[in-house]
Amino acid sequence: PAELLQGLTMLKDPEQQEKLELREEELRQEHTTYLEQHPELRQVLNDFMSSVLLHRPEQAFDFARDYFGAFKQPAEGQEASAPGSSSS
């Protein structure tokens, strides 16, 4: 994504390039603030990456679906499953 933005800035005139750079910095700050307000996200992603590296799944998207699906709140009348209980 950053490389794409850098490539796009080369195609713009200086005013457009400045606007793009300002927007990029604004988004970076918004994202940083959001992550600071939600430190649990970093832990969730670290746990997921550790699990991926431990299990080394052939189908990463299926593994991610199963991994994060385990955290999904069950619909009324359904039983909850524990995270990591699937055999991927």
Image: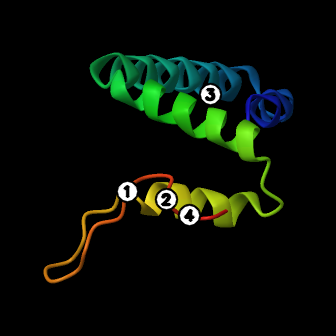
Callout 1 touching callout 2 (CB < 8 Å):
yes
Q: Give SS at disc 4.
A: helix
Q: Residues within 10 Å of mark 1 (few under 14, many from 20)?
A: few
Q: Give SS at disc 2.
A: loop
Report whether 74 appears left or right of 86.
Answer: left
Specify which label sits upstream in the sequence, 1 or 4: 4
Q: Residues within 10 Å of mark 2 (few under 14, many from 20)?
A: few
> Residue at the location (23% across, 80% down)?
78
Residue that badge 3 annotates? 20
Q: Residues within 10 Å of mark 3 (few under 14, many from 20)?
A: some
Image depth: mark 3 or mark 1 in front: 1
Report whether 19 appears left or right of 39.
Answer: right
Image depth: mark 3 or mark 4 in front: 4
Q: Residues within 10 Å of mark 4 (few under 14, many from 20)?
A: few
- For badge 4, the amino acid type reads Arg
* Along the viewing direction, whichever of 52 and 33 lies nearer the viewer: 52
Report whether 55 appears left or right of 81.
Answer: right
* Along the viewing direction, whichever of 46 and 25 lies nearer the viewer: 46
Q: Which mark is residue 85?
A: 2
Residue that badge 1 annotates? 82
Q: Position of residue 21 (x, y in %)?
A: 63, 20
What distance separates the C-alpha of mark 3 from that of mark 1? 44 Å
